[in-house]
Image (cartoon, rainbow, N blue to C red):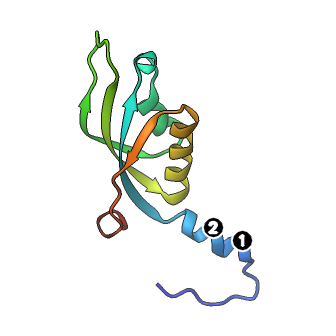
Amino acid sequence: MVIQRNDNLQTDSIDSLGDQRPTQTRLKIRIPKAFHEEPIISRLVSQYGVTVNITAALLSANARDDGWFDLELRGTTLQIQSALIYLDELNLETWGQSNAEEDGW
């Protein structure tokens, strides 16, 4: 893609173009037992606008242990960054499995 210089274009507009680029990332998250009743995945969709594909999961209704989700998140760079900040703010353990060649659109 070629971006032409426009004297009326502000620098912050150029920076925001990357925030709107569609992308995806893969990650694994650990869901502690205390969070089993929390709508974590639902909030990723409703509050952060990402599309969530659950590629694997281990979470039982009567589980005594932590659960795990392998997720694929799709959205703009800004949406995914915001969703990852949300997961971090919950202090959930996450492992990134992103592959730039496969994940970039």
Q: Compared with residue 64, is residue 53 higher up or lower down, i.e. above or below?
A: below
Instruction: Please say if the residues under marks 2 and 1 sit with CB atoms less than 8 Å apart.
Output: yes
For the point 28% across and 23% down, the residue is 59
Q: Secondary structure at mark 1?
A: helix
Q: Where does the image place residue 34, in percent across and percent down from the top left?
A: 45, 16
Count of residue discs: 2
Q: Secondary structure at mark 2?
A: helix
Q: In screen coordinates, is 81 left or right of 33?
A: right
- Quadrant of the drawing holding the C terminus: bottom left
For the point 56% across and 47% down, the residue is 82
Q: Where does the image place residue 103, in percent across and percent down from the top left?
A: 34, 62
Find residue 12 and name its label: 1
Circle 2 residue = 16
The answer to which of 7 and 83 lies nearer the viewer is 83
Q: Residue furthest top?
A: 62
Q: Where does the image place residue 56, in percent across and percent down from the top left?
A: 23, 37
For the point 69% across and 88% down, the residue is 6
